[in-house]
Image (cartoon, rainbow, N blue to C red):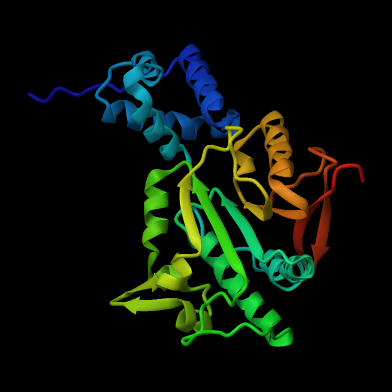
Amino acid sequence: MTITTIPAQLTEAELKLLQALIYQECGMHFDERRTHFLQDRLQRRLKECQLDSFYSYYRLLISQNGKEELANLLENLTINETSFFRNKAQLELFHKQILEEVIQKKHASGDYTLRFWSAGCSTGQEPYTIAMLVVDALAYFQMRNPNSYDLPLPKPLVPAPWKVEILASDISYSALRAGQQGIYPDHQMNSVDYSYRLRYFDKVGERYAIKKSVRELVHFDFHNLKTEFLPQRNDVIFCRNVMMYFDEAEQKRLVEKFWRCIVPGGYLLVGHAESLLGLTDKFVMVHHNNGTAYQQVEAGK
């Protein structure tokens, strides 16, 4: 005789407790439209932990021994949907206009370090896309502005005296591990031009591996955007399709933090369906050929 286990029912009170805990931990907000998704993910974790009630699960999450499970839950609540060269109009704006301006400004001031942050980097396609575009932009700039530095052979990916730092952060440890490996199946390469595949990837069987020289430009690290301890002095921050997880209050707090993390006059790039309209007056929109970005308004201006 087979005994059928009846799934535990999530009460309104338990749902509110768990919603509040998730919001407190990472700022993610689940309104009525996304409650079903939250319930589904909670049901999966409850089964995985072999618990018989959502209140027991809540007690586990807030206990000293629950830190690992809390991390598992948050990872299950994020949808790691990403691709190379996503939102091409915005990347065109970044590549041809923003990078050109940033590089010119740095060159004029004698500061040759370029810092970028991919916040919510998922499995690495975004920060590696940034790396490829930055390398291209620097090569083009050096062609027009040759310097007296003796370049070793073979030529380095980033020409002297430039230094490129790309931080890629996420709250998903499995996504970060995949990003660090930098190996992608053929079907994820559809948006990568042949010339980029040739220059920046190695073909390994049926998969493509990011070249070591490109991987070395990107540092993957765990970051929770809820925290105040965020990377500083970024020239450009990418935070695309992340703010949609937050309510308006948390979005405002995050944008304020980004403003403090960007160099004067730096840029913030958000998702195609996201906007800073009504959230802040500390950024001004830049728009070109359907691509949008937000430039930091310097203090006192």
Q: What count of labels does the image hold?
A: 0
Instruction: Name the residue at 62% across, 73% down.
Output: 161
Relative to residue 256, is residue 28 drawn left or right?
left
Asked if residue 167 lies left or right of residue 185, the reply is: right
Whole-percent x, y for residue 231 in the image: 60, 45
Percent from the top left, x then y, of residue 17? 49, 16
Q: Is residue 83 visible?
A: no
Q: Can you give x and y, in whole percent of width and height, for residue 255 in the image?
A: 72, 40
Looking at the picture, tell me which residue is in the foreground, 113 or 21.
Answer: 113
| Residue drawn 39% across the image and 21% down it | 61
Tell which residue pokes out farthest to the left in this image: 1
Picture residue at 47% right of the left edge, 41% below the top: 171
Between residues 249 and 160, which one lies in front from this camera angle? 160
Which image quadrant for residue 181?
bottom left
Give x and y (percent) for residue 10. Answer: 42, 19
**Is 280 placed above or below 126 here?**
above
* Relative horizontal placement of residue 210, taking residue 268 as reference (left or right): left
Q: Nearer the viewer, residue 114 or 119?
A: 114
Q: Quadrant of the N terminus?
A: top left
Is residue 81 visible in this depiction of the protein?
A: yes
Can you say whether 31 is above or below 183 in the image? above
